Amino acid sequence: MDNDLKVSLASLYGVFLRLGLYSFGGGISSWVHREIVEVRRWVTEEEFVAGFALGQILPGVNSTNLTIYIGQHLRGGIGAGVALAGLLSGPFVIVIAAGIAYRYLLQVQGLQAAMSGVAAVAVGMLLRLGLVFARRLPHRIMPASIAAATFIAVGVFNWPLIWVVLVLAPVSIAGAWPRPVGDA
């Protein structure tokens, strides 16, 4: 990202409004990455990964955490609020309209099949984002081991995420902590 670049609040709102509409139903992290890092180059890959990781460990919805991080990174507190308002305003209107039309929507043939298709697309987009991260980040044994241990603990053994994070986060931080040159 160009450090002299100052993203306008209108642009920030507009981009996140579109992202909120595109990703209605999930998969927003992939859309945000594509739009903010690859297309607009408002943040670097490293800045995005930092915000993505932070959004994963903070309480709340990961996508809103990421949106707030990016808005704050680009324009401070007002940017965080504008980005979040953009992200939520489109889906808010759609949910209100869907709530009003709920009884009519239930009568539409094929609606359940369409929703299943949308869910499959969201899963595919998350897998794509995982592959992008895996290819672009440095390949070291410690982060890969932590990722594998987390996947096995939560995905295979169904252990509570909070306990997995409480155990593996300190291990990961210790493994990534910079060491003075010459230490063994």
Image (cartoon, grey):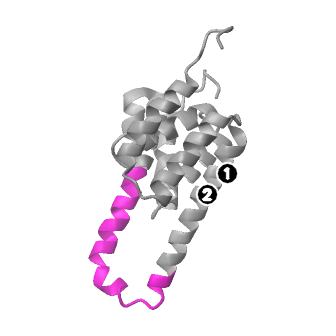
Asked whether 6 or 76 is in front, the reply is 76
Three-letter code for the amino acid on which mark 2 is drawn:
Leu
Residue 81's quadrant in the figure? top left
Mark 2, other Cα within 10 Å: few <14 / some 14–19 / many ≥20: some
Q: Where residue 175 is drawn, which disc sits there? A: none
Magenta highlight range:
87-113
Residue 108's place in the image compared with 132, above or below, is: below
Residue 130 x/y as whole percent: 62, 50
Per the model, the C-alpha gap separating discs 1 and 2 is 6 Å
Residue occupying image coordinates x 30% and y 67%:
96
Residue occupying image coordinates x 42% and y 27%:
76
Q: Is residue 96 visible?
A: yes
Residue 44's quadrant in the figure? top right
Quarter of the image containing the N terminus?
A: top right
Decide whether residue 94 is among the magenta residues: yes
Provide the residue designation for mark 1: 131
Residue 94 x/y as whole percent: 37, 66
Q: Where residue 127 is drawn, which disc sits there? A: 2
- Name the residue furthest front: 184
Contact, mark 1 vs mark 2 (Cβ under 8 Å): yes
Please tell me whether the stretch drawn in magenta is mainly helix, strand or loop: helix
Three-letter code for the amino acid on which mark 1 is drawn:
Leu
Q: Secondary structure at mark 2?
A: helix
Quarter of the image containing the C terminus?
A: top right
